[in-house]
Image (spheres, rainbow, N blue to C red):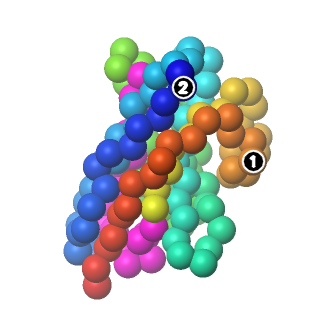
């Protein structure tokens, strides 16, 4: 059974930091890229960042460049999203997702094969 389990969400003040984790199981981790998406109420799901498990290539949305960092521990089949300098507009449910193949369209949620249940991140002003 494929599982992606997010953890690490919570409430933080603006300017603060959080690190999200995504633990994967049930598929060959090294063959997939794992990304983070977020969805705020009334908004579309937005690609935040992605990392290729095979070569470590990373991509970021412009809105988080310089503030968020994605990393992968292949021995633990876990991907992390370190979020710093958080802003109220970062408030959303954060999902991790796995995709097999090209990352040319990594921001397109429909390309992803597996999804986690999400974890809430709330940034207060």
Classify 70 as above or below 108.
above
Give me the residue at 41% from left, 71% from top: 91
Q: Secondary structure at mark 2?
A: loop
Q: Tags 1 and 2 in contact by the CB under 8 Å rule?
A: no
As helix, strand or loop, the secondary structure at mark 1 comes to helix
Query: Quadrant location of residue 66?
Result: bottom left
Distance of mark 1 from mark 2, alpha carbons?
A: 18 Å
**Of the numbered discs in the image, which one, if any, rests on residue 32?**
none
Q: Position of residue 46 (x, y in %)?
A: 61, 61
Determine the residue located farthest toward the front in the rendered image.
Answer: 1
36 to 74, vertically: above or below: below
Q: Is residue 70 above or below residue 31?
A: below
Does 51 sit left or right of 118 as displayed? Answer: right
Q: Residue 29: tell me if it is visible.
A: no
- Using the image as rendered, state which of residue 93 and residue 53 is in the foreground: 93
Question: Looking at the picture, how far across and down is residue 12, in whole percent?
Answer: 23, 69
Q: Which residues are magenta?
A: 77-92
Q: Give the residue pinned by disc 2.
A: 2
Residue 110's disc is 1
Q: Earlier in the sequence, mark 1 or mark 2?
A: 2
Name which residue lies at 37% across and 24% down.
73
Q: Is residue 8 visible?
A: yes
The quadrant the C terminus occupies is: bottom left
- Image coordinates of residue 34 in percent, x first then y, are 55, 35
Q: Residue at x 27, y 61 (%)?
A: 10
87 within the magenta span: yes
Horizontal arrangement in the rendering, residue 107 relative to residue 98 (left or right): right
Examine the rendered structure and indicate whether residue 36 appears above or below residue 86.
above
**Crowding at label 1, few (<14), some or many (≥20) Cα neighbours within 10 Å?**
few
When asked about the image quadrant of residue 100, the answer is top right
* Residue with the most extreme bottom position: 125
Q: Nearer the viewer, residue 53 or 77?
A: 77
């Amino acid at each position: 059974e494929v599982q992606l389990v997010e953890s690490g969400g919570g409430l933080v003040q603006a300017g603060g930091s959080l690190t999200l984790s995504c633990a994967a199981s049930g598929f060959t981790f090294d063959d997939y890229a794992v990304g983070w998406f977020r969805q705020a109420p009334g908004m579309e799901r937005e690609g935040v960042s992605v990392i290729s498990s095979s070569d470590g290539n990373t991509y970021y949305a412009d809105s988080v460049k310089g503030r968020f960092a994605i990393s992968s521990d292949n021995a633990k089949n876990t991907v992390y999203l370190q979020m710093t300098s958080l802003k109220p507009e970062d408030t959303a449910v954060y999902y991790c997702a796995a995709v097999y193949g090209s990352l040319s369209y990594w921001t397109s949620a429909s390309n992803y094969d597996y999804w986690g249940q999400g974890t809430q991140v709330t940034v207060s002003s």
